[in-house]
Image (spheres, rainbow, N blue to C red):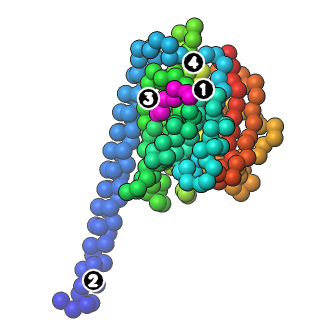
Amino acid sequence: MNNSAQFKKLITWLPRMSLLFVLLMVGLGLANSRSMAREVNLCGERLGQEQEQAGQSLSSHLDILSWNIQKASNEGWAEDLAAMAGDVHLAFLQEASVQADIPSTLQGRDIYRSFTQGYSTASINTGVMTLSSHTPSMLCNFRSLEPWLGTPKTATVTEHTLEDRDERLLSINLHAVNFTFGIADLEKQLKPLAGLLAQHPGPAILAGDFNTWSEARQDLVDRVLASHGLNPIEFSDDQRTRAFGRPLDHIYVRGLSVEHTEVIPVHSSDHNALRARLVIE
């Protein structure tokens, strides 16, 4: 067969190949959507149902930290974490490395680690890690893929029993997808978390690195979370890390009042850390 005939044959098959590709992508998308829906349902069914462990409840006063720790790869990260999180009840860490043995930096405390693996290589496993002063009553994990790079971005969901209260605290630690055209992929990542917030009647915290570097991304996050009663806490001396002039890191709360907030500048990560003192209403 000469080159001209081969080219004509290829042209003939291109529409069929394109159709097969589209059908394959649609099929994969539907499969992923169904899988995510099952995960949300399974996680939602566990809300408020896990047995409380004696002595493992949080008080109504909470000190929390949220920090993208940049894989614990820079000098001084352990000292900074020990100084910032030595007395917190919940620490929401993004880009946390398993190999760094992060909980061991908070010496003299019983720390419980809840981890969802994201980016990994042969030598390092990183993801979002929630450290808590008490054992969570429930843990769920969610993963999304960066549409360009294919690397996972994750969320760790934990539920915590509260002293002298029937309701429980839902905490979500999020590292949002970053390199996207438009907001569809971010909206898809937020959807299962919004589903859990809708099912959980009590107080809630959603903290992390939202990668809100555009007005459209910020508006989406605000709108989705506001529809479930969560509002962003404000920082008077706002030194949060920014991209294109917009802060990337946030803490959203529902059913909690804010007593104190601060942004802590650091050199051990490319993100400054957020601290807050909250009271359950």
Q: Residue furthest bottom?
A: 2
Answer with mark 2 or mark 3, whichever residue precedes in sequence: 2
Q: What stretch is highlighted in magenta?
A: 108-114
Q: What residue did someone put label 3 on?
A: 139
Q: Do tag 1 and tag 4 residues touch (Cβ < 8 Å)?
A: yes
Question: Does the stretch in magenta take in 109?
Answer: yes
Q: Is mark 3 on a helix, strand or loop?
A: strand
Circles 1 and 2 in contact, beta carbons < 8 Å: no
Q: What element carries label 1?
A: loop
Q: Position of residue 35 (x, y in %)?
A: 35, 39
Give the image quarter of residue 165.
top right
Residue placed at 63% from the left, 50% from the top?
76
Amino acid on which the number 3 mark rests in the picture: Leu
Q: Residue 89 carries which label?
A: 1
For the C terminus, the quadrant is top right
Q: What residue type is labelled 4?
A: Leu
Element at label 4? loop
